Image (spheres, rainbow, N blue to C red):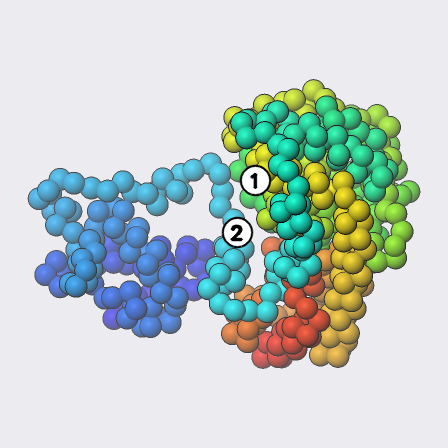
Amino acid sequence: MDWNIDRKANKPIYKQIAEYIENGIADGTFPPDKPLPSERYLANELNINRSTVVAAYDELESNGLIQRNRGSGTTISKDIWGITKKRLPSWNRYIEAGSFLPNLPVAQRIRKELEEQKLINLASGELSEDLFPKNALREITSTRSFIGRLGYDHPQGSAVLRDTITNHVKEFRNIEANPSSILITSGAQQALHLVIQCLLKPGDSVVIEDPSYHYNLPIFKSAGLKIFYLPVNDNGVNPNELLELHKKHRIRMIFLNPAFQNPTGTLLKESQQKAILEISSELGIPVVEDDPYSLTSFKGEEVSTLKSLDKHGNVLYISSLSKIVASGLRIGWIIGPRSVIERLSDAKQQIDFGHASFTQWIANDFLESEQFHSHIKKLVKELEKRRNQIVSSFNHFLKDQVEFTIPQGGIHIWCKLKRDVDEMKLLENSIKRGVIYVPGSMMGSKKCYARFTFARENEETINEGIKRFAEALNATR
């Protein structure tokens, strides 16, 4: 039986299968008195994951075309002939009609493979569990009294935590802030969503870096924004190019990750930061600074932030504990003008009635403790060792096949392949060999790049992962 599956088509394979069966029901290829192929059989027949067949059958079932029966398999539904007049909602059509766009298929694939397989994980942008300060957090929960509120907290988050963050950003990031100008969020991701949803409207022009983590976020397109790209080179972005973009497109907001940028690892010089702030002040364009990594400098020096240099209140500063303490705490924050923070906190309250008080309490006590200082020192030392390992592994296994700049902080390394390869075939070959990473197309517009995260694995598995990637690269033409 010829299923006519086109693996290079833009249409997902599960939809192709569903449409083929729907047409087959109509023309008699699939008669009502015989069961359809089982999910396992069809997956083997087409050489695809069983989950793809499950998705196709889910769509057919939601449209009322088939029914699943334990013991007798999947059969054509009698409902389509008008016998019972009962139909399930066409859930997949509702899903496609929603305005909130899904993650890119590659991002979904990476997440699914990590859930279903034991892979060397050079893709996930988070710390490994052995880098979490587990003992310190256990001590807080077991020896200290809970001081938070069990009812709904202040819309902007715990007043105690906001006061602690005020002191924290002053000590570690040289940022002057006031508790009333801070909003506690569920990580930096929610902060970005609130800014986009509350301060911009469809048709507005925004600038993001290319490549960047923001490049991979569907939220910009979901909000109907016009996206323009600011190239990132070895020294970060060029402020003059930002000025040119504004002249052409009347930019409404700028999104930047100046400190050890994700994915390139570049550090924007203070002179470039000042130039960007000057442009922002001259033109009245707000800058959203996403700062997960400024405390991870391997040289041990203080890294300036745009917000620390901001004299006029042009910068909305976003940071979190996800990349330096533990992603599961879900503690992030936005610092900005009070009127903006009140607008964002009103929106957050509509979504979740404020942040969980228990994790705010833990985060507050840890930030206030001496253990935070020792944890950061230990974390940076360990990240530097892992950075050194991935650089050594690149040099040993990939030699002249890649180009890269050694990052001086953060958790990512951005790699350029010296020859043109099929990006998806390379990813597939890598997964088959037990290692996963992020293809460059997820992060930027240029071809033949890849992002590797060195915070998720130890030195031994990093070395093995790059070895397997090299084998996959050599096998991909």
Determine if residue 445 is in view: no
**Which amino acid, by three-letter code, is at mark 1?**
Ile
Q: How many numbered marks does the figure carry?
A: 2
Expressed as whole percent of the image width and height from the top left, the position of residue 43 reads: 33, 68
Q: Quadrant of the C terminus?
A: bottom right
Residue at the location (84% across, 58% down)? 298
Expressed as whole percent of the image width and height from the top left, the position of residue 259 reads: 79, 48
Q: Nearer the viewer, residue 209 or 345?
A: 345
Mark 2 crowdedness (10 Å alpha carbons): few <14, some 14-19, many ≥20: few
Q: Nearer the viewer, residue 270 or 328?
A: 328
- In the displayed structure, 40 sits above or below 305; it is below
Looking at the rendering, which quadrant does residue 86 occupy? top left
Q: Quadrant of the N terminus?
A: bottom left
Residue at the location (62% across, 47% down)? 142
Picture disc at residue 153: none
Expressed as whole percent of the image width and height from the top left, the position of residue 138 reads: 64, 51
According to the image, label 1 marks what residue? 219
Q: Nearer the viewer, residue 73 or 116?
A: 116
Residue at the location (43% across, 64% down)? 7
Determine if residue 386 is in view: yes
Q: Is residue 400 left or right of residue 25?
A: right
Mark 2, secondary structure of its residue: loop
Q: Earlier in the sequence, mark 2 or mark 1?
A: 2
**Which amino acid, by three-letter code, is at mark 2?**
Leu
Expressed as whole percent of the image width and height from the top left, the position of residue 260 reads: 78, 52
According to the image, label 2 marks what residue? 104
